[in-house]
Amino acid sequence: MMGKLARLVRIRWVDASSGDEGWMDMSDFKLPDQRCLSVGWVVCEDDKQITLCATRGEYEDDINGTITIPKPWIGEIQPLSVLP
């Protein structure tokens, strides 16, 4: 699936937020900072989303720790270099 052509990238994106603080006065609410930075190997990508994995097998296409990020939430995708 990933093979030798898998790209390593860093993505700057903004996540959704769900409050877990229970009932509160609206004047006490503060907007959370949901800016995120993810680094990983591109597993798959289409026009709507991109999926990264944090860990991959060195000699096989085994992957672990995936995250799928909707494209509208992404601010920047930066390719990274892999050292030998």
Image: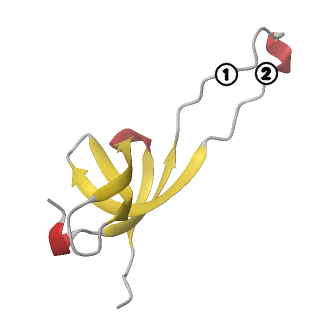
**In-image side of 15 versus 83 (left or right):** right
Q: Quadrant of residue 42?
A: bottom left
Residue pointed to by mark 1? 19
The reply to whether discs 1 and 2 touch (Cβ–Cβ < 8 Å) is: yes
Q: Residue at x 36, y 54 (%)?
A: 64
**In-image side of 84 versus 62 (left or right):** right
Quick one: SS at disc 1? loop
Label 1 to label 2, Cα distance in Å? Answer: 10 Å
**In-image side of 23 versus 54 (left or right):** right
- Disc 2 packing (10 Å; few <14; some 14–19; many ≥20): few
Residue pointed to by mark 2? 29
Quick one: SS at disc 2? loop
Percent x, y for residue 61?
Answer: 20, 63
Q: Residue at x 79, y 21 (%)?
A: 29
Percent x, y for residue 50?
Answer: 30, 49
Which scheme is used to colour this image of the protein? secondary structure
